[in-house]
Image: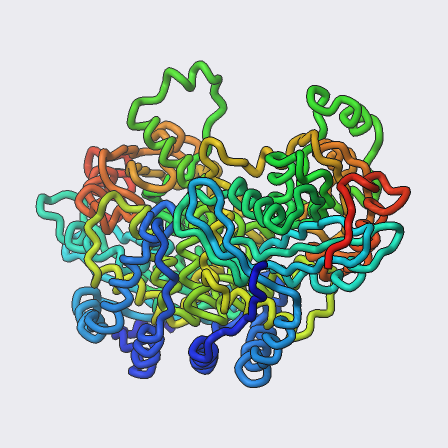
Amino acid sequence: MPPTITPYTINVPDSALKSLKAKLESTNLPDVVDFIDDWSYGAPLSDIKRLTDHWADGFDWRTQEASINERLPQFTTKVEVEGFGDLDMHFVHQRSEVKGAIPLLFVHGWPGSFLEVEKLLPLLTKPADGGPAFHVVAPSLPNFAFSEGPSKPGFGLKQYAESMHKTMLALEYDQYVTQGGDWGFKVTRAVGHFYPKHCLASHINLVLAKKPAVSAVQEASAYTDGEKAGLARTDWFAQEGFGYNLLQSTKPSAIGFALADSPVALLAWIYEKLHDWSDDYPWTDDELLAWVCMYQFARAGPAASARIYYEVQHPKNEAKHAFATGYIPDVKLGVSIFPRDIYVPPVAWARSLGPVVFGGMHAEGGHFAAHEKPELLAGDLRKMFGKDGGASEIAQRFAV
Amino acid sequence: MAPPYTIAVPDSKIDELHKKLDVATFPDELDEADWDYGAPLADIKRLTAYWKSSFSWRDQEKTLNQLPQFTRSIKVDNFPALDIHYVHQPSPSPDAIPLLFCHGWPGSYLEVVKMLPALQQSHSGVSFHVVAPSHPNYGWSEGPKQRGFGLKQYAETCHKLMLSLGYDQYVTQGGDWGFYITRAIGLLYPEACKASHINMIRASPPTLLKNPWQAVKHKLLPYSAREKKGLERSEWFATEGSGYRTLQATKPATIGFALNDSPVALLAWLWEKLHDWTDAYPWTDDEILTWVSIYCFSRAGPSASLRIYYEATHSGPGGVTRDRTQEWIGGVKLGLCYSPRELTVVPMTWGRTLGPVVFESVKTRGGHFAAHEQPEEIVKDLRGMFGKGGPCHGIVKAGAKL
């Protein structure tokens, strides 16, 4: 019997909105000191105060909710993940009317969500110029937004990959390509690793490629200014920006209690990244709060989102997750590097990840590429799968 | 003469705490999670319920107010003066020497309390005038409003406090930030701080260049079984237990919002450490909640207590880096205490790279909060180090006070 695809409408219960407002109105903020608004120390007090006040008393969730429901066609389907039972998967699905469109699995990361796909949808499903078109599927990862989460430990990359792959199968996309950054990088790599006959090509925008062994002399002369800046940005992330990652990878409950009990804690936790990891993107307050609400109102609760870090760091159900940053031979690979991402290697390093058929380095844009620079990212996908692109042969397989 | 200090948390703060505990929202928990992911849900729920309905801050406050505690204004260079809280228990014995006790995170001056009666008594020809401050940003001390208040300033605060009490020469005891601060004191004020006892030993392997004799021993002799276990413990701390530290050293303000706004967040954040860092210490709920309440009701607020991590890691020119405190400091005699469940348990050849080590003790039990978990052992060490026949007997002049 074919799986049931059920249309989904976000409808946060009134009780959740009420308790959120009550908590926001009794927020206890830290005392003012001279450096309280200095980004080096973390989220500034003035911003958090402004956003907290707006969230309590200005931001209209019901309007946002209706708007998201209108703009993004959403569905759910139950998929079985071996050892974990059935999980109800939430996803955006928009088909293209162009014949031969390529099914594309778009996987978000943290602290993002399915919302990140929105600006790409018209560019990918309704290309203006006869270039490749895509049917786009953008699930919420288990434990995120409106997907269920697992109730036992051990849900690692294999399980995340399985949940994504089975969602595609439920939509009768037996073969497809993928796009992802942040956790979308590791999860789509896992999809390619475990399902190479189904996942034919992958495009990534967080390129966690290790440094190849080169001599110091070769190294010193080889990097362009852009590459040097990227490596400096990568160093900054490792030195100053990695704390959330180490914490969530070792003690997810420590932050989990905070995220579950305090909306301001959640706001600060996410807002700091939306600022630090993007390239001067002009976030509006409503935009920021809508992103935070994806965690505040998540089906599995805000604390669950930290668990992916722990599980991938402590693999239980199979050997290490080393394949994710190793060479995956059967999946054609496209990489796009944005200068204000959190790990910015020289494009050439990507060769260690797989057969690279497209490589682009941009002059602007950050970690949330699909949201910050949708035209650039969509442009890269269309080049990669276009008739002169490195994955054109893959695109042909979907031609009618 | 400094006025005695009375802790008097306003009713409004206690009410606010209770209101928040009343509407506490808990996450779910994975089956069989136990302590792997952090503090267990059952513990946090139980402690929250107890904190809300049974724990009496006023009762604890009354007990805390029985300690001999004071505040005075201490000014360090380039910063405005701060009102510093401290416990001061002098001894009437003529063989008493001044002892500065430095707490760490997530501890407080309370960590000295169990040792107070013994330290005041003459034994082995020594007793102690005990001074245990709340560091700036902790407990009942004010916190600085300017950036850059790092190890140098924490050390200077302690030193000036000792001088203001008439102790121009003294010895120190500390672990956690107490390790770093007392080491900085020894570095900056060797004419005053003549000897230090430390229970968290952060040191690197000896090198032929810097510590030739230890390096040779290190190369030739295998680690003992105890030292190997210690390295495993240290490895656990570095890989599984250091998330909080990296976060606090880079983005203290971000996590600070959580600790300030949610008492449950603060409880979970701290209780996990009290559990993981001790050696099966039988914490009572009252004890846990008193420790957590000191952060909750602290003068500078819980988020301020994290700043030392950031400032010590981003030390500018003229500051004292943590790295420097983990290298040889020549002018201060050292006593090292090795407990099996401390966070960093290094081989003894490594410990001897820190300075002239004149006293070593190896405990068979105990963890990070040594003075609180095994006060009799630390007292024994201090008497062994400073008492008659000990390597530091008479190192600072003794005299009765009171």
Q: Residue at x 48, y 17 (%)?
A: A215
Pick the residue in front: B223 or A400: B223
| On-image quarter of the N terminus of chain A | bottom left
Q: Residue at x 52, y 70 (%)?
A: A151
| Above or below: residue B213 compared with residue B305 | above
Q: Is residue A389 visible?
A: yes
Pick the residue in front: B140 or A175: B140
Tell how many labels.
0
**In-image side of B321 versus A275 (left or right):** right
Residue A346, percent from left and from top: 36, 29
Pick the residue in front: B339 or A143: B339
Residue A359: quarter of image = top left
Residue A134, percent from left and from top: 22, 51
Q: Residue at x 28, y 52 (%)?
A: A104
Pick the residue in front: B102 or A159: B102
Q: Is residue A319 visible?
A: no
Q: How is the image coloured?
A: rainbow
Residue A291, percent from left and from top: 28, 61
| Above or below: residue B266 compared with residue A348 | below
For the view shown, which residue lies furthest in the bottom direction? B53
Q: Residue at x 23, y 45 (%)?
A: A280
For the view shown, which residue lies furthest in the left direction? A128
Residue A154, percent from left and from top: 56, 60
